[in-house]
Amino acid sequence: MTNVVALNSRDHRHLRVQASASARYGDSQNFVAVIVNEFPFLVVQYPILFSKDSETGAFYCGAMLGFDKGENLFLDERKGFEGYRPLNLQRGPFYTAGGDVAIDLDHPRIDGGGQELFTENGEPSAYLNRVIALFRELRPGLDATRGFIETVVRLRIVEPIDISATFDDGTKRKLEGLYTIDHEALQRLPDDAVVDLFRRGYLQLIYLMIASLKQIPALAQRKNARLLEATGALT
Amino acid sequence: MVLNIPMVQPVQNVVIVGGGTAGWLTAGIIAARHRARMKAGFTVTLVESPNVPIIGVGEGTWPTLRTTLEKMGVSETEFFRQCDAAFKQGARFARWTTGAPDDGYYHPLMLPQGFAQVNLVSHWLKEDRGRSFCDAVCQQGQLCDAGLAPKMITTPEYQALANYAYHLDAAKFAPFLQKHSTETLGVRHVLADVQEVIRDGNSGDIKSIRTQQAGEIPGDLFVDCTGFSALLLGKALGVGFKDCSDVLFCDRALALQVPYETPDAPMASHTISTAQSAGWIWDIGLPARRGTGYVYSSRHISDDEAAEELLRYGGKMAKGLTPRQIKIRSGYRETFWKNNCVAVGLAAGFLEPLESSAIVLVELSAKLIAEQMPVNREVMDIVAGRFNEVTHYRWGRIIDFLKLHYVLTQRTDTQFWIDNVDPDTIPDRLKNLLKLWKYQPPWFLDEFDRLEEVFPAASYQYVLYGMGFRTEVGPMDNESTGLVAQRYMAENEMLTRQLRAQLPRNRDLLNKIYEYGLQPV
């Protein structure tokens, strides 16, 4: 359940939020919605793919962090989060409501401990200022992402991708409902459409998505290493 | 020296006369197929009278329409929104066999599981008496029972988890196709009344049509989509009509649009066809209303009695409504393509909409014309000959298949049903097949092996065994295929459970399509 309310210094003066990465705070997700501004950071670490919202069927961009539901292969309870942490995980219990920052009071990150949101005299804390800065990036980023998706879907340069992997413990995974850029369809586009993609900055995003596919085998290796670690611990 | 160059008359200008569903579907299919040639002078013109009202031929379609619309470049989301379209997963026939209240079976749109590998009929007959044939071999009957849609909001346009066609508002479909054909596919639209069909004195070909508002319109190939009046093929070229009311008795229809009790009332994702005292009632779920109608034989019931039966069927929501009467004549043209004129739609013929064959026949005919579009007049007769042969075969098979629904009845409560099993009214070919099917169930490698068979052997299986027909199975018949059959029936059970858990309610998905749309990929 969620309990989202507008944040204010009167009611939430003494509220604290756990900011660190942990499974118990909701970081254990294997596919996280991302915005196009994040692509350059994501590409060195994650496959960036499209998926569909199960309620509306609408496409969204996401980073793949693991193979199984709830599996985040970049999260280590002892060492913390490895590398770039997607904004959607960074924002934790915060939302925007119109121009205001809102907070989900039922979020697991609110357990009494962690970072304070306001200073003694009611000013936003350094942590809250970072959250506000993050939303300043996230909100226009969402519009830019929608525009990007609308364009590639309209041009029909999106295709389903079947990801299947066999791991050293003999188990197999087959992921469905994921999509990527259709490279052949992209190459068939007329020149004016390609120039338009370039001018709007979409061509770069497209190639970042294509390049990020190389992270799929790396992610599989990462999982394999964890599986071996687990079985190694037994022998 | 005089060089004598033989005149080869190219076929460049196609003129379609009539702007109903048949006309616009034909225009769209031909234009989409030959779009690239338009730069080189190929034209598709549709001439439509501003004064003749459109007859909405049925609101049921076949899954072929999905491919047809996709090839025309139509967005399925827009089609759903603008034509009040809904999903159709086949038909349920109620009270056709015994007339009892619980008597009914499905003719679904899915093939039996593993249909290409094994014929499940004999296995079902031997081992699965408790379950209906449909439920034993495919998922769709149970999806319909549960009121589920055939796909999810994440399934792309035109793709399916369970095969589907559409129910649609025919009065909105023709204008929708018109807009797409003229704005996107380059079809020329002329609003004018045809005054005269001008023919060549020697060949008898149609040279042009003279219109009241737009003068003379010449063409190389004319498509007659003028409905029952068959202005070109029937009136101008004198091609006769082959009546088949001796086989199919129904000659009247009463149509009635019934509103739902509440806007979110469940809507069936299949056509419901309920047998009556002298015919049957169709019941088609559209988003805002149900389209119902009584197709009946005027020899067996009066118009007033028929109206009474229909209003009774419609229940309290039909109270005070007045049905609209349509006179129908079952039969088809003796020739469909003569000289440079070919008839499509009602101009080619009409059959009662028991299996929604009207729109699918338009699609098949238009596709055949588009694919086989003769390059010049010289080869047109060859194409016409093939077109006539295939189309005759199709009409014959549809008539057989429609009659099959009647001859398997056990009803003797009215003269209509008694007359329908009279051997003199059953085509010989169907009689022979019924004899054969007593010993071997229909499947591949028999009669139905045409590439574009309208009703495949699977359809005959669903109707035969849905209506309690029994084929003798020898003690050894199932030996060699037993394991495979078991596997497919088990697979069907598993898929049925999966789909039932996964699929949304029919109306819920339609509402989502209106709100969010389906994705093209």
Image (cartoon, coloured by chain):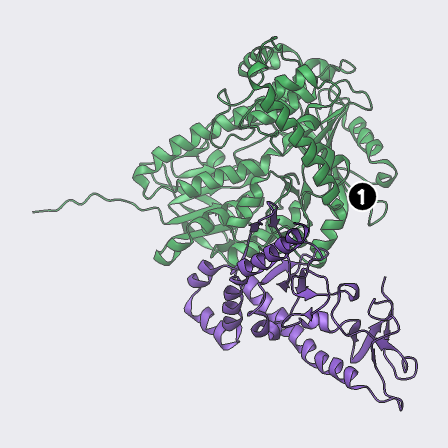
Whole-percent x and y of residue A234?
Answer: 68, 50
Mark 1 burial class by Cα count in 10 Å: few <14, some 14-19, many 20+: some
Q: Nearer the viewer, residue B80 or B345?
A: B80
Q: Which residue is mark 1?
A: B266
Q: Would residue B333 be visible to someone looking at this image?
A: no
Q: What's the residue type where badge 1 is placed?
A: Pro
Residue B2 appears left or right of B338: left
Q: Is residue B477 above or below residue B182?
A: above
User: Which image quadrant for residue B415?
Assistant: top right
Residue at 24%, 44% (x, y): give it.
B7
Whole-percent x and y of residue B35?
Answer: 42, 54
Kindly give the residue lying farthest to the top in the view shown: B475
Which quadrant of the rendered structure holds the C terminus of chain B?
bottom right
Q: Is residue B84 above or below residue A197?
A: above
Q: Nearer the viewer, residue A61 or B270?
A: A61
Residue B336 appears left or right of B290: left
Residue at 39%, 50% (x, y): give it.
B13
Q: Secondary structure at mark 1?
A: loop
Kindly give the residue lying farthest to the front in the view shown: A235
User: Which image quadrant for residue A58?
Assistant: bottom right
Q: Chain of mark 1?
A: B
Kindly give the residue lying farthest to the left in the view shown: B1
Q: Which chain is green?
A: B
Q: Would residue A138 be visible to someone looking at this image?
A: yes
Whole-percent x and y of residue B474?
Answer: 60, 8
Kindly give the residue lying farthest to the right in the view shown: A11
Q: Nearer the viewer, residue B242 or A220?
A: A220
Q: Is residue B509 above or below residue B494?
A: below
Q: Which chain is purple?
A: A
Whole-percent x and y of residue A164?
Answer: 56, 50
Q: Nearer the viewer, residue B149 or A72?
A: A72
Residue at 57%, 36% (x, y): give it.
B228
